[in-house]
Image: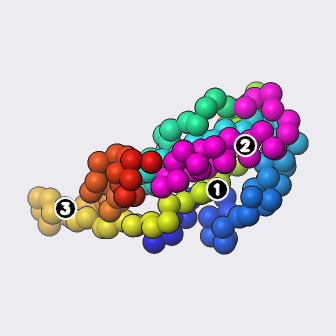
Amino acid sequence: MRITQGTFSFLPELSDEEISLQIDYALRQGWACSVEFTDDPHPRNTYWEMWGLPMFDLRDPAGVMQEVKACREARPRHYIKVNAFDSVRTFETMRLSFIVHRPEVEPGFRLERQDAPGRTQRYSIAGYALDRPAGERYGSAN
């Protein structure tokens, strides 16, 4: 199952050149880029782990791409995304966020139903990856 979160998630995978062009666009807008990773891509998991610090003073996309490549090398079985944060007063929000790396196998999610009093049924989704401990969800400690 292909996780579809963030900008470009319904498109085919972006090449490194295309990723670099998107990063360049973000930097030209004055947005700060950061790299994050996770092995729990649940849609409500908004707190991915940061790879290093946000790059507030960076103006060259090669610097961000260097961090993306380092994160891919260290975490090959994780989801990795690039964020672009706009720090302008009154905005102060994420303007762009997109996945730049995925594990080879994406196990997907299951729908879980819970019966409650009065014929009430509650539904939630749970990732199949969560059946394994953190760090082992995609077959390795990486």
The residue lying at 59 percent from left, 57 percent from top is: 101
Point out which mark residue 134 bears.
Answer: none
Q: Would residue 95 be counted in the magenta stretch?
A: no
Instruction: Give the SS element for disc 1.
Output: strand
Nearer the observer, 11 or 140: 140
Q: Position of residue 39 (x, y in %)?
A: 43, 51
Q: CA distance from mark 1 to mark 3?
A: 35 Å
In the rendered image, the residue lying farthest to the right is 28
Crowdedness near tag 2: few (<14), some (14–19) or many (≥20) residues, C-alpha within 10 Å: few
Numbered circle sitting on residue 114? 3
The amino acid type of the residue labelled 3 equals: Gln
Badge 2 element? helix
Q: Quadrant of residue 137?
A: bottom left
Reading the image, the residue beneath label 2 is 66
The residue sitting at 61% across, 32% down in the picture is 52
Disc 2 and disc 1: Cα gap in Å? 13 Å
Q: Earlier in the sequence, mark 1 or mark 3?
A: 1
Give the mark nearest the N terminus, 2 or 1.
2
Q: Amino acid at mark 1?
A: Val
Front residue of this view, candidates 141 and 95: 141
On the rendered structure, is 56 left or right of 103?
right
- Characterize the local packing of mark 3: few (<14), some (14-19) or many (20 or more) Cα atoms within 10 angstroms: few
The amino acid marked with disc number 2 is: Gln
**Which disc, if any, is residue 100?**
1
Above/below status of 18 relative to 94: below
Does residue 125 show up? Answer: no
Q: Is residue 23 above or below residue 14?
A: above
Q: Which residues are magenta?
A: 55-83
Q: Is residue 56 magenta?
A: yes
User: Do the residues bearing badges 2 and 1 touch, measured as CB atoms within 8 Å?
Assistant: no
Residue 15 is situated, as x and y percent measured from the top left of the image, at 73, 63
